[in-house]
Amino acid sequence: MIDGVCLVVDAAEGAMAQTKYVLSRALKMGLKPIVILNKCDKDDAWSRIENGEVEIELFETFDALGANDEQMDYVTVYASGKAGWSTTDIDLAREFSTGEKVAKGKENSMTILLNTILDNIPPPEVQVSKLKGIHKPDEEPFAMAATTVGYDNFLGRLCTGRIYSGTIEKNDTVSLIPRGVVAKDINHQSLITSNITGIFVNRGVLRTDLEPAIANAGDIVTLAGVPNNIAVGDTLTLKSNPIGQPLETPPINPPTLSIEIGANTSPLSGKEGTFIASSQVRQRLISETDNNVTLSVAKSETDPERSIVYARGELQLGILIEQMRREGYELTVSPPKIITTKCESSGKELEPYEEVTIDADSEYSGTVIDSLTGGRKGLLLQMSDSSDGKTRLVFEVPSRGLLGFQSEIATATRGTAVVNHLFLENREYAGLIGGVEKGKIVSNDNGKASLYSLANIAKRGALFVAAGDIVYSGMVIGENSRPGDMEVNPVRAKETTNIRTVNKEEKLYVPPPQKYSIEELIGYMNDDEVVEVTPKSVRLRKAELDSGARERAARSRKKQMKALQQK
């Protein structure tokens, strides 16, 4: 869809993990970026530029992402969006940044940046397509790969992309060729077809109708009325003159995480939410995939009332669940599972690895390293200090090792750490990750938590509930200070007698309860626990509410853990 790319880099911070992801896609397409060093007027930015640190980091980033010699010979523009200036002259950039007197005739604006884009990025050109239609070889066939897909309540299924060849008009009938299909396996008579009901283009931030409603090769358009099962990377072609094979498109990063979501099955089900049926929950999850192409939903094989959601991380799942909670849904969320695959050549189990970049205060760098390189099986690749007291740490970590890491490191660094992670590849299974599971304090009775009971329970660990909160048997009300779960009665009230002593009238104190967000609970809960989500509450509970069944399951899980440790 693009003819060029501008890589905007903070001159003080350097290239971040999300920058590398976009840059890698551009380099694979053979594009030569224009590097824009923004915020050059920062206090510590100019020293990094003069020392060559910024250029070295960029060269290393380009080299690590497989850039060729031509792409490495990029144009650098020094700029400050806040001050409104840009230049390709490093001496002039120093004068702008340091506030020195600039000679007359030196333009202080963004004109240099705009001229650089015009000089180095070619205008859109429509090349003569090598594709040939099956029915009309002399005519250039219509072909467009789906870059993004969406859904509109009035227009139906939408598809946005750049037309590779041919033309498309309103009311034309198109056929859908799935991505990755071999040409010899395509049966054009059985392809899914639909009529184009609208052609739209973006004018600024608005989407408007294309008039006249005909688009040509090179145009970036949004088509309405495309087949409902279209996915990113699929090819659209005219039914009257289709192409013989799908267009080549870059691969999509696979999901790394799966989670089971179902209706609320706790004793408090139906008391706070509006949508409580499993069919309503599944329909809402499926509708989310209409506009969120990185999510996919399937039925659970173990429980027909649950749905498996495949995503790329805890944050994405946390946003989805929080959005459904605010819409009035009651949910039960199971622990996340990392998606593993098998190597075709060796048959070994593979799991996703990610590159993690952490910017933290230098005093916490040891804490960050210990947290990721210990039980989480991370590998430290790079460590660099900056003049503002920050340290940048780069790791390679199994995706399993990042579960629950965000909340843990935020507490350890007092919220000063900035974490970015990027999918790398699937590698050999890293074995057991983590140490002993954190013990929990579990309620064995139903009712309202009393101040008297909580005051005694608080001596054994951190509490998740306050006096007066509704609890039930099997609900997790705190974290045990020792390994293993501990069952308590949080509703037991103080005995009422007519005896008065100093100890009897002792004032009770209960520390404020710890509150976790949905995202934090997803990474915090153990394998035998689930999260109960309602519009008013977020509770952690045991998947099995019966105490006897939990004990039997715990013994079985303990044997499995010993077997894994012995391997």
Image (tube, rainbow, N blue to C red):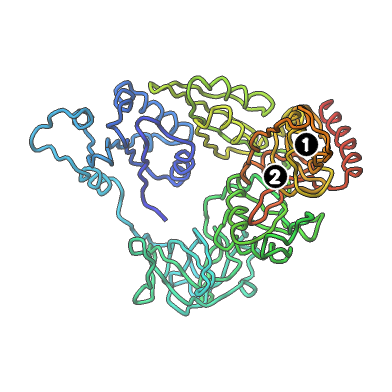
Q: Position of residue 96 (x, y in %)?
A: 20, 32
Local crowd size for mark 2, using a 10 Å CA cut-off: few (<14), some (14–19), many (≥20)? some
Q: Which residue is mark 2?
A: 339
Q: Position of residue 419 (x, y in %)?
A: 52, 34
Which sits in the foreground, 480 or 248?
Answer: 480
Which sits in the foreground, 431 or 304?
Answer: 304
Q: Position of residue 251 (x, y in %)?
A: 56, 50
Identified at 51% across, 69% down, the residue is 152
- Is mark 1 in CB contact (under 8 Å) with mark 2? no
SS under mark 1: strand
Q: Position of residue 72 (x, y in %)?
A: 38, 34
- Quadrant for the N terminus in the image: bottom left
Identified at 54% across, 75% down, the residue is 239
> What is the C-alpha distance between the residues marked 1 and 2?
30 Å
Mark in the foreground, 1 or 2: 1
For residue 538, above or below residue 35: below
Q: Judge from the rendering whether residue 565 lies leftward or rightward of residue 16; answer left or right.
A: right
Q: Judge from the rendering whether residue 326 lies leftward or rightward of residue 155; answer left or right.
A: right
Local crowd size for mark 1, using a 10 Å CA cut-off: few (<14), some (14–19), many (≥20)? many
Q: Amino acid at mark 1?
A: Ile
For residue 350, above or below residue 302: above
Along the polypeptide, which appears first: circle 1 or circle 2?
Answer: 2
* Residue 343 seen: yes
Identified at 74% across, 63% down, the residue is 278
- Quadrant for the C terminus in the image: top right
Q: Which residue is mark 1?
A: 441
* Residue 433 seen: no
